[in-house]
Image (cartoon, coloured by chain):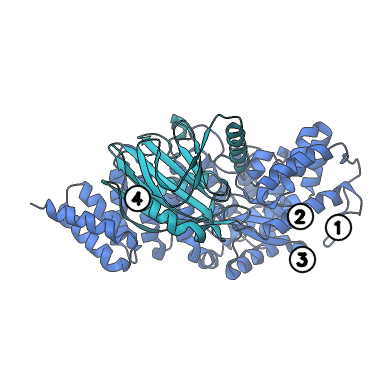
Amino acid sequence: MKRSGCVARMFALLMAIAVLAGCADERLVQPGVASANGGIVIDTSLAWSRFVFPRYEIWTIDGIPLNRLYIVPAVKSGEHVFLEHRARADQADAPTFHAGMRAEEIRDIVLDALTETGAVNIQSEGLRPARFGTVDGLRFEFRASTVAGLRYRGMVLAAARGDQLTFLLWMAPAEYYYDRDAGSVDRLLDSARFDR
Amino acid sequence: MTARWCIAFLLALLLVPIARASDAPLRVATPGSRPAPGSDEAALWYAMDNAERELQLSPQLVRDAALNTYVRGVACKVAADYCADMRVYIVEQPWFNAMMAPNGMLIVWTGALLRARNEAELAFVIGHEVGHYRAQHVIQQWRHSKSVSAWTSAFEVAGTGAGAAIANPLGSLASGAALSSFSREQEGEADRLGFAAMVAHGYDPQAAVELWARILREEDTKANGKSASLFSSHPPTRERLDAMRAAVAALGAHADERDVAAYRAAIHPFLQHWLDAELARRQYAASILVISELLADAAPEDKALLSFYLGEAYRRRANAGDREESARWYAQAIALPDPPVAAWREHGMALRDAGQREAAADALHRYLELAGDAPDRAFVEHDLAELQEHAP
């Protein structure tokens, strides 16, 4: 069963408290070549605040509600695509990654996981092959709303490397923020590669 | 559910000592009447009016004029004299649910429209909700809860004070909101009133039995025993089904109007979209049952679409044997008139996985021919190139 939006918001609040309490490591990313956990290297023309969690990172320019770049490396087969929890027997239908998934299936689990976080009216477009460095991957864009009606747009780069999924997901309000940074983030995703 | 809900919840906690329960008798709720100014019921209506204003802005509201006109028409038939007191909202949520607030805000979720087969079933669902409205169950339950627990009261004020909470699939569940936490007696009374309303309008009462039986079967797909339906919380669905069967038997001869054609015409434009939403719930055992039963009852023109989505449900679940099942349904879909274009792609992929490379390539070529500027063209062309590369 879907987690309630309030629980999701409480989770976000706890995450914010964790950030404030120093549980997440915050750093500044300057324009240029930057590295993220999982051996991911990107070229960015933007400066970011970088919040590092044990298994993933969130980068933001103006604050997480306004724009955020999830960098999620090494999702193992059988794990929730957002690394929220390990799939359990009674959650067999959770959006979990499985080795060998097709591009459409990877897109679907990412979007279904977004639905779990409370996004509504999700639409995807532009599913296409892409390179994640030397690894074959996929790109797509999406649109979504909050239940209160705030419209977001986003873009995703994903690649299965061995039996693990790595993806970068950027989203920002369709009003102003998306258009302002979409070109820069598009180039950032094009530049993404593994350093080993 | 939004931050506003959380804020409303906290505010409600502060307001609990102020908003005390009333021992006033229920007012005579004649059509067009409103609660007395200053009463606790007026305060509840005020919260509902605020919720309704938020709901009117919700991105989940289905604004299609034809569908709204149709559903409102059915609602007015069973609401009779109370029609003018009622505003109907169709909300994009793939679960089976409907609810009616005491201020006349009637909400029907798209999951209920997908699962109903005819106008008679929809009339029963709405008649049930109108029954809660006419019998003033919300204000009764609200007063009862406030007398039992200040915490529960606070939840209800908060839960009903935000349209998003009502529109949210779990909003009303999580908050225990007044709109969905009725007593066994109140649910039974609403069933009886809904049943009487549909019978009075000449609908076939057996439709109510068939609807409840279908909901019970869907509930039974839940491995953890939890209800798959938000509509049927308490008393148990089986008990309500038995009561409905007894009511039909006691009725003897009855009308048999179901208005299948009108219902199908109203929902047909949304069928594919609602099936996508159904699969996005990721409750595949329930979805396989729901779509299988829709397929069994479907008009010929919908069978290819439903066969394809049944294949999709199996493919996405991916349990042992599901790949073979999905392949079977894709093959059926493309053999029927007017299959969705994506059925050719999935049929091709299934043939490829089964080692039938030539047939797979044919199906994928057919997909690309039909799909025009398919967004996944590059992936399919890549798959085709691989098939040709490894051709014997």
Q: If you read the primary sequence from the N terminus, does the residue marked by circle 1 or circle 2 appear first?
A: 1
Pointers 1 and 2 in contact (C-beta within 8 Å): no
Dot 1: element: loop
Q: Which residue is the site of mark 3?
A: B84
Dot 2: element: helix
The Cα atoms of the two marked residues, 4 and 3, are separated by 60 Å
Task: Give how far across and how far down residue B164 sits, in percent.
Answer: 66, 51
Q: Which residue is the site of mark 2?
A: B50
Dot 2: few (<14), some (14–19), or many (≥20) neighbours within 10 Å? some
Q: Is residue A98 visible?
A: no
The amino acid type of the residue labelled 4 equals Ser
Q: Which chain did the renderer colour blue?
A: B
Dot 3: element: helix
The amino acid type of the residue labelled 1 equals Arg
| Numbered circles on residues, count | 4
Q: Are marks 2 and 3 on the same chain?
A: yes
Q: Which chain did the renderer colour cyan?
A: A
Give the label, 2 or 3, closer to the camera.
2
Task: Give how far across and how far down residue A52 sits, in percent.
Answer: 48, 35
Q: Which residue is the site of mark 1?
A: B34
Q: Which residue is the site of mark 4?
A: A191
Dot 4: element: helix
Horizontal relation, residue B262 to residue A160: left or right: right
The amino acid type of the residue labelled 3 equals Ala
Q: Residue at x 26, y 57 (%)?
A: B380
Q: Is residue B347 visible?
A: yes
